[in-house]
Image (cartoon, rainbow, N blue to C red):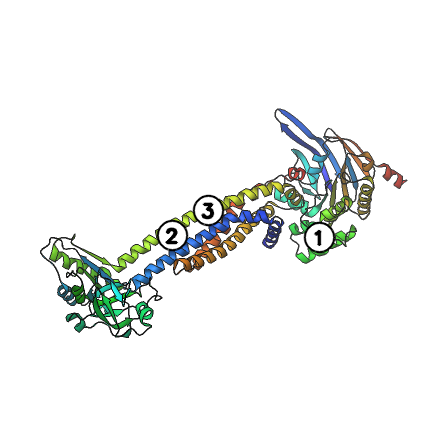
């Protein structure tokens, strides 16, 4: 489903060329829970931007659900983000002046769903993350963990093929961070494909497969300890 | 995302910072109000002038003679004969002598205009007789000291029973034989404040005996030019010098008035338009600030699948809504102020639907025009950079 083939992303800074991604080939199947790990500057964010159709590679091909996504226009990228991808960010990235329901409805608005259907789907998603009783609250009235759950609900509402989580626990304390990770596991158990980006090895171990990136290259690709234990 | 959603979003966004929204709108409010007020006042002024011309008649032609040093001259009989010789074009003629005289009723001085005319005046003027009768041929030929007054004098000094009462002009007693129908609002400053006497009687009360001013009426408005030509030809044949007389048709003067007020309106609207332009720049400025402030929001929306057009329309609609609301407030302000100003200046002011429509659509267009640039800036933001923006 996610298929990166020999992806290069090269930035030109004056005379110097910076290889943010240096020949990355990666295949992720439906239903997987993959952690992409690396230190800052390793290229993991660039990798996530390309998987998330927020950026296009300098060379190489990226196909998502069989669609070649490496040569799309901005609007076509937007459409793919809208229909096939759900984003969860470190900073939650909720819009402060919209209430929870409106925040979760946003991707559905851009998808062109009628109001009734939107409200239904958004309410369902918020109920799923345990915030069904706070539809009219505003993000600022919630704790960090709750806000992250809203952003998960927003990612889920459109029933995407892939959920992309970029350091989802980075801004949370370890306990609420764990809650969020457990929730992601649950989603994975329900059959959702999840790609988790993190710099933290212990968090990466919560996924089923770990892909380590260093200097724009994949240096390790293995099942996680958790996965090994479970399969034993 | 459709228009309705963009609109709701725009309203929400405006409500979150009311003071800023109001200040942004202020330029548009002032611009729109200025357009409506200025156009209404010029309109009112034009209407006032037209009202006064109306009492004379659009088919009239005025002739002024200044036969200085000329041995030849024309008199009333010549003018009447000219009229009778051209029955297809000319309807009637009356001398039109402004008497430099002062009128009194009892001991009270009047500010009325005093005009000496012939019995044909009624055929030429649009005035109608309201009470009593008009001057007759007999009054004229026998230099009767009788007069017809405007409704102001009748109401103000005689309580409506002015017939057969008297007033004094330069010490001569004149009997009121008729009252003209009200043409304006019977106030002192209106054309209802006048005294009409036989032109022959003017000679009795002032030193002037030469009738230097005449008013002709063409059969109808369309014949004004033709009538003017006939009169000019005749006068030239007498005087052989066109410096000694002037002939002006009312139609011509109306044209001039029309052009004049049109030009004044254009200049004033231009000035008011500049303030609309400044208002538009104010909107653009605030929208640019708003785009910068909301960079992160734009990044979020883009990551969730907002397309170029979605972001564009959000900001354009917001700018247009701001200026349209400003436009509506400006229209209300403009209407109120122009009505109040009209009352104070005694002008028949009524804001025209056209000026309101123009002001409103112009303000909405200004919003869209000046919203376009910031909106494009927003839509062009790179989602990755926008998401990282603090």
Q: Which of A64/A9 is in front?
A: A9
* Residue A152's disc number: none
Q: Which of A140/B374 is in front?
A: A140
State the residue at coordinates (69%, 49%): A103
The residue where tag 2 is placed is B265
Residue A97 at what x, y percent from top left? 67, 48
For residue B294, which quarter of the picture? top right
Q: Which of B71/B242 is in front?
A: B71
Q: Which of B142/A94 is in front?
A: B142
The residue where tag 3 is placed is B275
The residues tagged by marks 2 and 1 sit, at their Cα atoms, a distance apart of 53 Å
* Residue A101's disc number: 1
Question: Are callouts 1 and 3 both on one chain?
Answer: no
**Quadrant position of the C terminus of chain B in the picture:** top right
Residue B333 at what x, y percent from top left? 49, 55
Residue B252 at what x, y percent from top left? 26, 57
Number of other residues with Cα within 10 Å of mark 3, as a class: few under 14, some 14 to 19, many 20 or more? many
For residue B40, which quarter of the picture? bottom left
Q: Which label lies toward us, 1 or 3?
A: 3
Which label's residue is closer to the chain start, 2 or 3?
A: 2
Which residue of the protein is positioned furthest toward the right in this rendering? A232
The residues tagged by marks 1 and 3 sit, at their Cα atoms, a distance apart of 42 Å
| Count of labels in the image | 3
Q: Chain letter of disc 2?
A: B
The residues tagged by marks 2 and 3 sit, at their Cα atoms, a distance apart of 15 Å
Number of other residues with Cα within 10 Å of mark 2, as a class: few under 14, some 14 to 19, many 20 or more? some
Q: Secondary structure at mark 1?
A: helix
Contact flag, marks 2 and 1 (Cβ < 8 Å): no
């Amino acid at each position: 489903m996610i298929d990166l083939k020999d992806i290069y992303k090269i930035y030109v800074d004056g005379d110097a060329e910076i290889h943010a991604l240096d020949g990355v080939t990666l295949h992720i199947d439906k239903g997987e829970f993959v952690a992409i790990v690396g230190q800052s500057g390793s290229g993991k964010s660039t990798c996530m931007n390309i998987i998330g159709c927020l950026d296009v590679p300098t060379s190489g091909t990226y196909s998502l659900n069989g669609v070649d996504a490496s040569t799309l226009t901005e609007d076509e990228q937007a459409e793919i983000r809208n229909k096939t991808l759900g984003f969860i960010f470190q900073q939650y990235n909720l819009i402060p002046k919209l209430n929870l329901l409106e925040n979760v409805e946003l991707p559905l608005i851009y998808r062109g769903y009628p109001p009734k259907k939107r409200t239904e789907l958004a309410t369902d998603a918020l109920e799923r993350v345990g915030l069904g009783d706070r539809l009219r609250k505003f993000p600022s009235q919630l704790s960090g963990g709750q806000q992250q759950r809203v952003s998960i609900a927003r990612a889920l509402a459109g029933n995407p093929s892939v959920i992309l989580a970029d350091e989802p626990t980075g801004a949370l304390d370890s306990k609420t961070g764990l809650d969020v990770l457990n929730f992601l596991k649950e989603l994975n158990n329900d059959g959702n494909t999840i790609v988790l980006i993190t710099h933290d090895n212990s968090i990466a171990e919560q996924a089923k497969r770990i892909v380590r990136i260093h200097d724009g290259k994949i240096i390790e690709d293995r099942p996680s300890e958790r996965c090994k234990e479970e399969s034993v | 995302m459709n228009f309705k959603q963009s609109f709701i979003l725009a309203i929400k966004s405006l409500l979150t910072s009311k003071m800023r929204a109001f200040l942004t709108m202020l330029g548009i409010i002032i611009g729109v109000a200025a357009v409506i007020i200025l156009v209404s006042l010029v309109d009112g002024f034009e209407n006032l002038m037209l009202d006064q011309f109306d009492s004379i008649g659009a088919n009239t032609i005025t002739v002024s003679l200044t036969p200085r040093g000329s041995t030849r001259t024309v008199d009333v009989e010549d003018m009447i004969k000219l009229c009778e010789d051209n029955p297809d074009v000319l309807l009637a003629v009356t001398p039109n002598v402004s008497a430099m005289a002062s009128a009194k009723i009892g001991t009270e001085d009047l500010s009325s205009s005093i005009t000496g005319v012939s019995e044909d005046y009624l055929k030429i003027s649009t005035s109608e007789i309201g009470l009593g009768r008009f001057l007759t041929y007999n009054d004229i030929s026998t230099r009767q000291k009788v007069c017809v007054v405007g409704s102001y004098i009748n109401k103000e000094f005689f309580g409506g029973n002015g017939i057969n009462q008297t007033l004094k002009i330069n010490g001569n007693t004149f009997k009121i034989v008729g009252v003209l129908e009200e043409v304006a609002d019977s106030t002192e400053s209106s054309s209802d404040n006048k005294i009409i006497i036989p032109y022959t009687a003017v000679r009795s009360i002032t030193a002037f005996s030469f009738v230097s001013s005449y008013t002709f009426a063409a059969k109808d408005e369309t014949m004004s030019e033709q009538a003017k030509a006939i009169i000019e030809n005749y006068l030239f044949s007498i005087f052989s010098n066109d410096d000694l007389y002037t002939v002006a048709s009312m139609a011509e003067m109306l044209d001039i008035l029309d052009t004049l007020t049109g030009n004044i309106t254009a200049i004033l609207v231009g000035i008011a338009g500049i303030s609309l332009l400044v208002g538009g720049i104010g909107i653009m400025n605030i929208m640019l600030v708003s785009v910068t402030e909301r960079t992160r929001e734009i990044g979020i929306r883009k990551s969730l699948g907002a397309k170029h057009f979605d972001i564009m329309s959000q900001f354009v609609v917001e700018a247009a809504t701001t200026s349209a609301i400003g436009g509506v407030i400006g229209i209300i302000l403009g209407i109120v102020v122009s009505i109040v100003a009209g009352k104070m200046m005694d002008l028949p002011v009524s804001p025209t639907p056209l000026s309101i429509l123009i002001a409103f659509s112009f303000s909405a267009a200004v919003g869209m025009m000046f919203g376009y640039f910031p909106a494009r800036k927003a839509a062009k933001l790179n989602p990755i950079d926008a998401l990282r923006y603090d």
